[in-house]
Image (cartoon, rainbow, N blue to C red):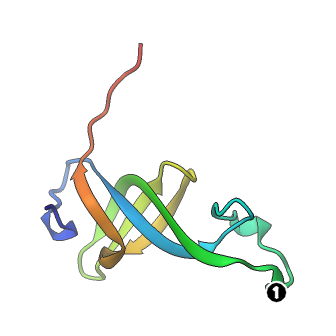
Amino acid sequence: IMKPEDLEPGKSYACKFRVRTYLNDNNEPLDTSSIPQDPSEWLLGEWESWGLIARRDSQARLLEVKDERAIRTWTLSYDDVWDIDVAEYTVNA
């Protein structure tokens, strides 16, 4: 089982993750520009997805992950990621 501490510079990795964020009626993350003005309309929940690890801050124990489902980037604690593996790229012809 690979941990964030095991990541080697220069290699590409992907992971699954969980983040607490504002969700829409379809339980998908809201764009920050779409958050309702009235706090009573905010729906806070857990979003789980997968993405490519873009950056790592080992001192702060944070990863920047590019979410492949929501097409956005999250800054996550090491504790909120799992199933880390080497990312393989393929070209579809």
The part of the image, by quadrant, that contains residue 82 is bottom left
In this view, the residue in front, 49 or 75, is 49
Q: Residue furthest front?
A: 26
Q: Is residue 53 above or below residue 90?
A: below
Q: Viewed as shown, does residue 75 lie left or right of 61?
A: right
Q: Is residue 21 above or below residue 54?
A: below
Q: Which residue is mark 1?
A: 40
Q: Is residue 92 above or below residue 35?
A: above
At which x and y percent is residue 83? Answer: 26, 59
Q: Viewed as shown, does residue 2 lie left or right of 49?
A: left
Element at label 1: helix
Q: Residue furthest top?
A: 93
Q: Viewed as shown, does residue 24 lie left or right of 49?
A: right
Quarter holding the C terminus? top left
At which x and y percent is residue 2? Answer: 15, 61
Instruction: Name the kind of residue labelled 1 in the image.
Output: Ser
Residue located at (26% from left, 37% from top): 88
At which x and y percent is residue 8? Answer: 15, 57
The part of the image, by quadrant, that contains residue 29 is bottom right
Residue located at (33% from left, 68% from top): 81
Q: Viewed as shown, does residue 60 lie left or right of 28?
A: left
In this view, the residue in front, 49 or 52, is 49
Q: Is residue 10 above or below residue 45?
A: above
Quarter holding the N terminus? bottom left
Q: Residue furthest right?
A: 38
Badge 1: residue crowd in 10 Å (few <14, some 14–19, many ≥20) = few
Residue located at (77% from left, 72% from top): 35
Residue located at (64% from left, 60% from top): 28
At which x and y percent is residue 46? Answer: 54, 73
Q: Residue furthest bottom?
A: 40
In this view, the residue in front, 75 or 16, is 16
